[in-house]
Image (cartoon, helix red, strand yellow):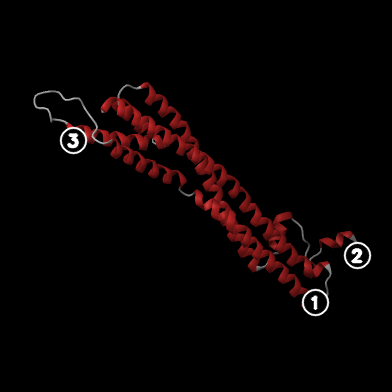
Amino acid sequence: MPIPSLLILGQGAVFSGGLAGWVGHTGPVGKSVLFLLALFSVVSWAIIVYKGLALHRAHAQSQTFLQVFRRSSKFSEVNSICGQLRASPLTGVFQAGYLEVNQQVRGGAGTAAGTAARPTVKSLDSLSRSLARAATVESTRLERRVSFLATTASVTPFIGLFGTVWGIMTAFGDIGRMGSANLAVVAPGISEALVTTAAGLAAAIPAAVFYNHYNSRIRVLGSMMDDFALEFLNIVERNFT
């Protein structure tokens, strides 16, 4: 068989055009698998781009927030810039702590008649719980949609494997019908199997890489929130107890 004849597929169709040619010779089941994998891939890349920008803003604004917080002498000054740094999870933690401190200070005001009582915080445990709740809320916000990347990384290889098995079954079915195992008979099924395998891996690998990368960045932001909560508690303990 001459080498050019390797390009010939069933019924004399020329298998050309690269990936487009392969997809064009894929059967209905293979096309359905490819469509599903393409859908997973498109959504995953949209999340990758969105979360990449969101986490970059969150980290940059957190650094700015810490600089402002450590330079300021009053919580009210820090609170005034929170609206400009909403992407930072530290903003939510600070505002929860600031609200709790204000409520406790107002609740303790007026106990000394006719005198200006020193503002005090009644319960550091209550303040610590408020900071922990806010940190949990912010962590949940940072992790939103990232789990879809894990789903894509774990599911799409199996979807591609289904397309692979189906393509091989198609190839064997063609051999049975044609009574021949030459390349022109088996090539459509084998090409379908290989294309779906490659598509499954193409969807899974970037999702797995960015899922691990973003989880690492989220853990860093989580550590920043924990450190900030301790710093906030120390300041309150020194100045309001």
Q: Which residue is mark 1?
A: 178
Between 86 and 208, the one nearer to me in the picture: 208
Q: Residues within 10 Å of mark 3 (few under 14, many from 20)?
A: some
Comparing labels 3 and 1, the label whose residue is closer to the camera: 3
User: Answer yes or no: do the residues labelled 3 and 1 have beta carbons within 8 Å?
Assistant: no
Amino acid carrying mark 2 in the image: Met
Name the residue tied to disc 2.
Answer: 1
Quickly name the residue at label 3. 107
In the rendered structure, the answer to whether residue 149 lies left or right of residue 184 reads left
Report x, y in % for residue 63.
45, 29
Q: Secondary structure at mark 2?
A: loop
Observer-side mark, 3 or 2, equals 3
Return the residue nearer the eye: 134 or 193: 134
Cβ–Cβ under 8 Å for marks 2 and 1: no
| Amino acid residing under circle 3 | Gly
Please tell me in which quadrant of the rendered image residue 160 appears.
Answer: bottom right
- The residue that appears at 70% across and 59% down in the rendered structure is 195
Where residue 180 appears, x then y in whole percent? 83, 74
Q: CA distance from mark 3 to mark 2?
A: 93 Å
Quarter residue 136 falls in: top left
Q: Quadrant of the N terminus?
A: bottom right
| x, y percent for residue 41 | 58, 53
Quarter of the view holding residue 113: top left
Q: In the current view of this chain or complex, which residue is farthest to the left? A: 114
* Vertical placement of residue 134 versus 227, above or below: below
Tell whether 165 sits left or right of 60.
Answer: right
